[in-house]
Amino acid sequence: MYVVGITGASGFIGSHLVAACLERGWSPIALVRRGSPELAALGIPVRSYRIGEAPPDLAGIDLLVHCAYDAQADNASACEALIRRAAASGVRRLLFVSSLSADPQAASRYGREKAACEAIVAAADGMVVRPGLVLGAGGLFARMRDAVRGIGVVPLVDGGRQPVYTVTVGELAAAILDLLAADARGTFAIAASEPVSMAELYRAIARACGRRVLLVPIPYAPLLLGARLAEALRIPLALTVERVRSLRNLRAVTIPSYPQLPRAPRPFSPEDCRC
Ligand SMILES: NC(=O)c1ccc[n+]([C@@H]2O[C@H](COP(=O)([O-])OP(=O)(O)OC[C@H]3O[C@@H](n4cnc5c(N)ncnc54)[C@H](OP(=O)(O)O)[C@@H]3O)[C@@H](O)[C@H]2O)c1
């Protein structure tokens, strides 16, 4: 039985990690900036954690999963501060939830920040998990589904040929806990080994939701310009400059299989897109 501290425990992936810990008889502790009725209903202890502020005391925590991310904050400095506090508090292992788009040369700030955090975590002998696009009722996938269910018009950069590697939120939570239990070392890409194209993914979402979607091919440069203009004019759009840039991070990668994981994420299934 482990005591597991989880930053971002109120979020999409974090809340599934909390549930997966409970299923295994482990004791999760939520490190969150505000409590939630869901955490309170489950009786999960909460310690106040806010990216950008000094981390709380982590005494009593065996394993720490750093899942929170704040697009407005300096996530690398926050990661460093959290690791220092973890070491001082006697935390045994730290696992950082990164992304397949982590890359020091990434077009998006997100990809570059994830790469910077990965380097900090690796230097502290922490573990890195790089999930693909996480399928379920939250995160980026839910925003894609909302776009299809809403106006039903989706701009497609480069014909929507970008490879998208997927994993269900349940598979990801189980893999993270399996890696912690195995006391694994290194970086782990967690996704199905075969990608689906962005265009295929949107079509699968539309079919699953019983909606029609109009996929509008548009080159990268004008889309980026439009997003920049909208931001300058303070027009709120789902497709922000950062989101457009992040499309540039999508590339073919190799997803290895890992001996520490009993089950590899299953191939993409349109079933996992259901509304
Ligand atoms: N979803 C995906 O497809 C995907 C894919 C690859 C990697 N990831 C990574 O997985 C992690 C979780 O993503 P998610 O999809 O679960 O997103 P999410 O639902 O938006 O969860 C983000 C969590 O971060 C917390 N947070 C944000 N700003 C914070 C701050 N300043 N201080 C403390 N906590 C803060 C949020 O707390 P509040 O509830 O208080 O807002 C929330 O609990 C992120 O690191 C993300 O980069 C996600």
Image (cartoon, rainbow, N blue to C red):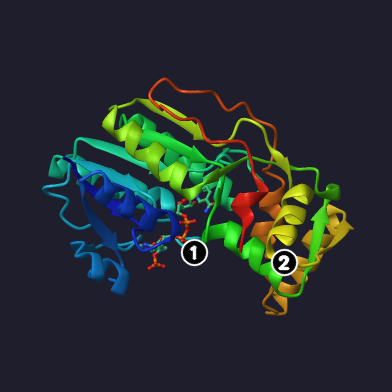
Instruction: Give me the C-alpha separation between circle 2 and circle 1.
Output: 27 Å
Q: Nearer the viewer, residue 140 or 236?
A: 140
Ligand 1 resides in the quarter of the picture at bottom left
Q: Is residue 183 above or below residue 117?
A: above
| Relative side of 135 to 93, left or right | right
Q: Could you tell me residue 86's position as x and y percent?
A: 21, 44
Q: Quadrant of the N terminus?
A: top left
Picture coordinates of residue 78, whole percent (x, y)? 35, 52
The residue under label 1 is which amino acid type?
Gln
Kindly tell me whether mark 1's CB lies below 8 Å from ligand 1: yes
Earlier residue among tags 2 and 1: 1
* Residue 264 x %, y %: 50, 30
Any part of residue 54 in sight:
no
Residue at 65 percent across and 63 percent down: it is: 145
Kind of residue at badge 2: Val
User: Which residue is tagged 1?
Assistant: 72
